[in-house]
Amino acid sequence: MKQWSRGAVLGGIVALCIGLSAQPATAASLLKEGFAFPVDRPTKIAVLRPDVSVGTLRSAGEDEANAEWTEVARQNITEEMKTQASAQGLALDFLGDMKGADGELLDQYRSLFKVVSGAIARHGFFDHLPTKLEPKNPAVPSKRWRMDWSLGPGAAQLRALTGADYALLLYTHDAYGSSGRKAAVIFAAMWGVAAPFGVHEGYAGLVDLTSGDLVWFNTDPAIGGDPREKLGAAQRVRELMAGFPGSKPASQPAPSAPAR
């Protein structure tokens, strides 16, 4: 009878666990059909402070935020957005933190963007809603789905506040698995139960502040880069800004460590 070493058994369990918890790994960018920036006048794009959260995923699945990690990641991502926007020749107006009613308004739209983004990520790429299906077109036999999500006409308040035509919003959330979490996931895999080691997600979107409509959206189910590190933040921003209207094709970046 063939003998198996303890290391081989554990290695098999880890491989099984990774296979069970894997998700579709396709970067996804949507552009509203027919959208293009105006060419007859300057366009102002306001960038809201990135909505960033970094913490630890505990053994039972508790997502515990880490204020220090979050602050470092937010600074890294903001600086990298400015660096990459400059390199791409994009004219972006980065808003600072605001206080009082103005600050509350920006927070409300960050939260609203997070909720709408979750719906787009699910129904815009994987589980399409029937209501988003375009009428049949003999010239285009394949199915086509509309990009018609919105933050609502109330987004005009952001236009009045910032004087911008569009708002660029970015959300990113990471919860790194604790040692207890990793052990729990490996144990669960022995019984055929899939569970993630951690959480890594991010969305970026461009909103027309006249109508509130999202005209561009991007996410990546296999998002990488540890935003607590500068190289990781550069990778994260690069992935989330891929396909942004008017951006240049990205050059091949230097390899960086994975975020997992």
Image: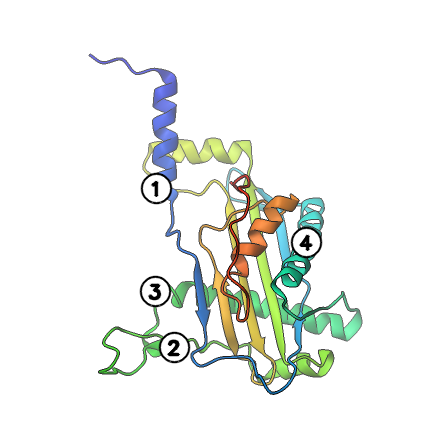
* Kind of element beneath mark 4: helix
Mark 4 residue type: Arg
Q: Residue 48: percent from the left, percent from the top?
A: 67, 67
Left or right: where 245 falls relative to 21: right
Cα separation between marks 1 and 2 = 32 Å
Q: In the rendered structure, which disc, 1 or 4, sits on the residue that comes first in sequence? A: 1
| CA neighbours of label 3 inside 10 A, class few (<14), some (14 to 19), many (20+) | few
Cα separation between marks 2 and 3 = 13 Å
> Which residue is denoted by mark 4 in the rendering?
74
Tag nearer the camera, 2 or 3: 2
For the residues labelled 2 and 3, say whether their Cβ atoms are less than 8 Å apart. Answer: no
Cα separation between marks 1 and 4 = 31 Å
Cα separation between marks 3 and 4 = 31 Å
| CA neighbours of label 2 inside 10 A, class few (<14), some (14 to 19), many (20+) | some
> Which residue is denoted by mark 3 in the rendering?
127
- Residue 20 is labelled as 1
Mark 3 residue type: Asp
Q: Residue 242: percent from the left, percent from the top?
A: 51, 61
**Quarter of the rendering containing residue 171:** bottom right
Tag nearer the camera, 1 or 4: 4
Residue at the far right in the pictured view? 99
Q: In the rendered structure, which disc, 4 or 2, sits on the residue that comes first in sequence? A: 4
Q: Look at 55% across and 44% down and name the residue there.
A: 254
Residue at the far bottom in the pictured view? 40
Residue 204 in view here: yes
